[in-house]
Image (spheres, rainbow, N blue to C red):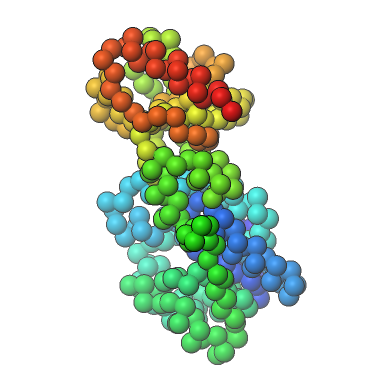
Amino acid sequence: MKIYYDANISYRHRKCVLAIGNFDGIHLGHLKVIKEAKKKAKDKKLSFGAMSFEPVPVMFFNKNVKNHRINSYDQKIKQFKKLKLDFLILIKFNKKFSSLTAESFVKDIIHKKINCKYLYVSKNFKFGNKRKGSVQTLKKFENKLKFKNIITKPYKKKNKIISSTYIRKKIQGGKITEVNKLLNRQWSVEGKVVQGKKRGRKIGFPTCNLRLHEYVIPKLGVYSVKVKSVHFTKNGIANVGYRPTFNGQNLLLEINIFGINKNLYNKVLNVSFKKFIRPEKKFKSYKHLKKQIKLDIIKAKQK
């Protein structure tokens, strides 16, 4: 998969089938669109690619939106690579790009630079300055610019449209088992281990601490997890929260990795969430907390 960081793509990838979207999470809804677009490309013997935007536009426009992402930037690229696209266009979403009119986006980028023949977008796709462009705008230019705009039917489960917004709400509600089904994989976060106060080690359960940065914040509490590094893959338990028993102030993801008892500071870990065990709570003493962690571990190890 060739990655482009602007719309100046090579001739071999022009006259293509293109899917456009934020693709945050690359869930079953996205996979449906990509599968249909990929089939069209195969049938028409055209190259197939996707266009996405970084940073996520809502985070660019609203600086108060901090914890929003289902996937990190790196995770998004890894997921696209697994889908075996011919190319990926990652547009830098900045002031200059956001000021582009809807008409210019269609004429100068979709037509002139990419020469797209089949364009796949969701029915609520908005683009151009002040989000003035819509699927109606695309339809208006179809004949003149000789491309076909295709809107796939949304993916539904139990009469609910599966979207990134829907999945974020499920993560925030601790519905991790459902989330993993909608993503077709376990939801995971990646980050470098940061130094903590070693309180877990003092009570017999050493932890690795990660900050959630831009990730959507899951329901505070304890989860069964799988942890991957360059050197190992292990199961464990993780607490998302503020550590009220210790009067913590900062949100952290604390992971106790089964079978690992060594310093992992600055190591990059991928933490996959398997199931929600219980909400975060404040314990009367370290002794009560220690007793509960032992019970949490038993639950985490159950299938």
Question: Quarter of the image holding residue 241?
Answer: top left
Instruction: Left or right? Give the position of 14 relative to 285.
Output: right
> Is residue 163 positioned above or below 122 on the image?
above
Residue drawn at 48 percent across, 87 percent down = 140
The quadrant where residue 194 appears: top left
Indicate whether 72 appears above or below 197: below
Residue 226 occupies quadrant? top right
Find residue 261 and report its horizontal and vertical position in percent: 52, 14
Residue 301 in picture, x, y percent from top left: 55, 23
Residue 14 appears in the figure = no
The residue lying at 51 percent from left, 41 percent from top is: 177
Residue 193, x across and y down, in percent: 45, 27
Nearer to me, 108 or 51: 51
Q: Which of 37/46 is in front?
A: 37
Residue at (54, 19) in percent of width and height: 258
Relative to 79, is 200 on the left or the right? Answer: left
What residue sits 59% from the left and 28% below the top? 303
The quarter of the image holding the N terminus is: bottom right
User: Looking at the image, how many numbered discs can be counted on the residues?
Assistant: 0
Q: Nearer the viewer, residue 61 or 274?
A: 274
**Residue 2 rendering spot, x and y as whole percentages:** 64, 57
Left or right: 60 as drawn, with respect to 149: left
Does 21 sit left or right of 80 as displayed?
left
Q: Can residue 261 be seen?
A: yes
Residue at the outermost bottom position: 144
